[in-house]
Amino acid sequence: MSSFLNSQLIETNIDGLDENILGNKDLVPTKISERTWDTYHIAALWIGMSVCIPTYMLASGLIAGGMNWWQAILTVALGNFIVLIPMVLNAHAGTKYGIPFPILSRAPFGVLGSNVPALLRAIVACGWFGIQTWVGGQAFNSLIAILLPSWALFSWGPAIGFLIFWGMNVYFIVNGVESIKWLESYSAPFLILMGLVLLWWAYERGGGFGPILSQPSKFQTTGEFWKFFIPSLTGMVGYWATLSLNIPDFSRYAKNQKAQMLGQAFGLPPTMTLFSFIGVAVTSATIVIFGKAIWDPVELLSKFHSPIIIALSLLALIVATLTTNIAANVVSPANDFSNLFPKKINFVKGGLITAVIGIAIQPWKLLSDYSAYIFGWLVGYSSFLGPIAGILICDYYLVRKSNLKVKELYFRNGIYEYKNGFNFKALAALAAGVFVALIGLAVPSLSFLYDYAWFVGFFISFLVYYFIMEKPEALAEASLETEEA
């Protein structure tokens, strides 16, 4: 553990951004002087990403499926503690070498083959961008209607509110990563405070936390519970399986390994668990106060009578959605699309591509019901992301012993060229993990493979890659030639 936390930071200068380099100013390694994010900044990043409407509603899908409140909260917490492990492991390379996710992917997949995992990650991010922008746009439209009551009669109101919120996202895309650091740092305490205020309101008005906290589980047998719990846990891991891959996009700005590790540990599992509990407790109170369970916070706010309270609450929802969307769903695909055509696509253009695709995916259909959201969307894409995580971790820790020749990641015909820029062994390992995880969709008797999609894909690809890839001693000469500070 001490060697992990005390790993030396390495600075690599990629001289001459000429026509031969596979990168641009957004993809080259950060200088040590640019690695300024401390533990608070990393924790604030996770608080900003975790406090959002989908997190608030996350436990609701589990309760709707039959769990009681503590089973749902425990499932959320366990899933986030599990996904924290690959999160911290993959963040190490970003902090040590200052490289983003698509560049790290070049080590196992090849300088061109890295586009396969990068684009798989980018497509998922585009879907999440659409979901968050849709939710945020509706909240913004409601806020305008409170400030200008006649706005509610305007048929184009929802569309305009959506476009305004979309424009707010674009503003931070154009202004880059430092503006994102500023947004997350200042919004984190505000979001936590608003969440606790909402929890206090629910407790006071509801005379306690109400019926949901006393309702038993709907499962009659242990077997019924496990049948629902397993895919649900996979869905919870899948919720942040995206960031477990592209966390180097942020950890490349961390001051040291301790900052990235503690920042993630303090920021991710506690915030996700707390905000999911707030969602459950507040909804419980709505049964007592309004006579029915109201899971949608925007709908809940419509029940209030004070314009000031409603406006302030909607503002909190908008800020929460914005912080999540920018950090979780823009940074990664922007870098991933830039990796595809470094000379033509920079961070800004990649972010705008994300914004357009996010709408084309029609996110409102993904939120149509809890089963489509958890078992279709979250579990489905985890079958692709788990295998990528397995390959990255196996390659970095077992094959290369956390030693990379960074300059070679940016040019053709180096040690990461493999065959015409592609490492077909890594692609085979990826295909094996995805194939095994998805067998459960076609073979009912093997449905447990899909239920465990992220876990199955992770371990299958990890093992296949380790046994078919050159062993550490075969790569030692190249791997141990680390870049000098």
Image (cartoon, rainbow, N blue to C red):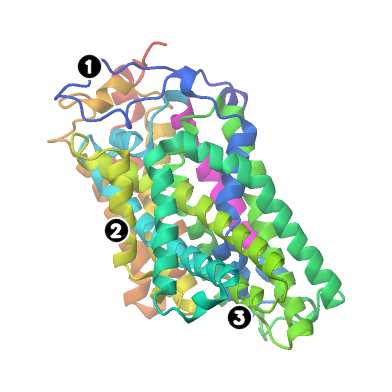
Q: Amino acid at mark 3?
A: Ala
Mark 2 and mark 3: Cα distance apart in space? 33 Å
Look at discs 1 and 3 and give the one toward the viewer: 1
Would residue 91 be found to the left or right of residue 342 on screen? right
Give x and y (percent) for residue 84: 57, 46
CB contact under 8 Å: marks 2 and 3: no
Look at discs 1 and 2 and give the one toward the viewer: 2
Q: To which residue does mark 1 refer?
A: 16
Residue beneath the point at 39% across and 62% down: 163
Would residue 184 be found to the left or right of residue 375 on screen? right
At mark 1, the secondary structure is loop
Q: To which residue does mark 2 refer?
A: 356
Q: Which mark is residue 64?
A: 3
Mark 1 burial class by Cα count in 10 Å: few <14, some 14-19, many 20+: few
In this view, the residue in front, 352 or 129, is: 352
Q: Which residues are drawn in magenta?
A: 76-95
Residue farthest to the top, as pictured: 484
Residue beneath the point at 66% across and 83% down: 221
Q: Which mark is residue 72?
A: none
